[in-house]
Amino acid sequence: MASLTKQTKIKIAAIVALCLIVVVGLAALTCGGMSFGAYAPQPPAAPSAPAAPSAHGDVSDAADGSYSFAAGDVDRIAISWAAGKVSVRVADVQDVEVREYISEGFGSRSVPMSCALHNNTLEINYANNTFGLIGCAINISQKQLEVLIPYALQDSLEQISLDAASGSYELSGVSVQSLQVNLASGKFDAQDIAAKEIAFDVASGTIYASGDFENVNYGGASGTATIVCSESLRQANASLASGKFILGLPQDANFTVNLDKVSGGFSITGFDAVQHDDVWVAGDGEVPIDIDIMSGDVEIRQMGK
């Protein structure tokens, strides 16, 4: 049966996510009639380099908060975001550029983000005041975040981590040693990514990631995830409490699946795999793939099938 420790973590993540939704909703009921004071954006950490074209062409306002950090000072990027839209992409810039956009909508208050460099980790948080975030998360203007990464930083970036409550998150053309994503709800889409390791902890929502990945680790309480590998893996691990997980592999992939299933379904599409009890072998079985299913469905699919 599935690992108790892993499944317990998944259940706790789901419960915490639901509790956060309830707490934020209740707090928002009182936000409309209360004033929590004005918030001024923090000043940029360094003068901004010339701006690259923005991906947020539909937002009429200019960037309300703009920050610039020397590429040589940034080894890791850590983003904690509550809602709205986030875009992380490579661009023709000299420094790492961080921009916050605010579009007018229902509500009249917006708590600015915080953005600072600590020990070579660029930390970006949805709000610079935790009380303001919880009290007004629903009743504020919509916020969007854009992070531009220089091409020169591609080979030296150690980690990108994302802790997301809800919203839409996009990564494009990024090369990083480790990509870590914790998603309570919402949508995550990563295209043309290169990473030695990608890891997802998902309470709910939709995940799609494609690129060159050596190690894939996925834990899901619910939701749907599709991970497409352009090159052969070295290792993969998936643990599901519920939901659906699809792992796309190249036509010449050789792997061994070790399955631990309580309920749910498992299938292999496009590969000639030989089954021995709870073990499936395709080709010479070089790549180990461990799958734990409490419920839900897992599919290993040949690309193009």
Image (tube, helix red, strand yellow):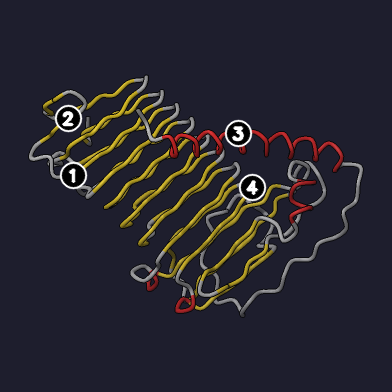
- Measured from the top left, where is residue 214 in percent x and y? 26, 52
Separation of disc 4 and disc 1 at Cα? 37 Å
Marks 2 and 4: which is nearer the front? 2
Question: Disc 4 marks which residue?
Answer: 82
Residue found at the very far left of the displayed protein = 284
Residue 137, label in figure? none
- Which of the marked residues, 2 or 1, is nearer the chain's N terminus? 2
Q: Give whichever of discs 3 and 1 has the lower sequence position.
A: 3
Q: Quadrant of residue 252?
A: top left
Report the residue marked by disc 2.
280
Looking at the image, residue 134 sits to the left or right of residue 11; the answer is right
* 4 or 3: tag closer to the N-terminus: 3
Q: Nearer the viewer, mark 3 or mark 1?
A: 3
Residue 162 placement (x, y as % from top left): 52, 53
Q: CA distance from mark 3 to mark 2?
A: 34 Å
SS of the residue at dot 2? strand
Q: Are marks 2 and 1 in contact (CB under 8 Å)?
A: no
Q: What's the residue type where badge 2 is placed?
A: Trp
The residue wearing badge 1 is 287
Question: Residue 84, image x and y in percent?
Answer: 63, 46
**Depth-wise, is mark 4 or mark 3 nearer the camera?**
3
**Depth check: 11 or 47 in front?**
11
Viewer-nearest residue: 24 or 302: 24
Q: Is residue 100 left or right of residue 271?
A: right
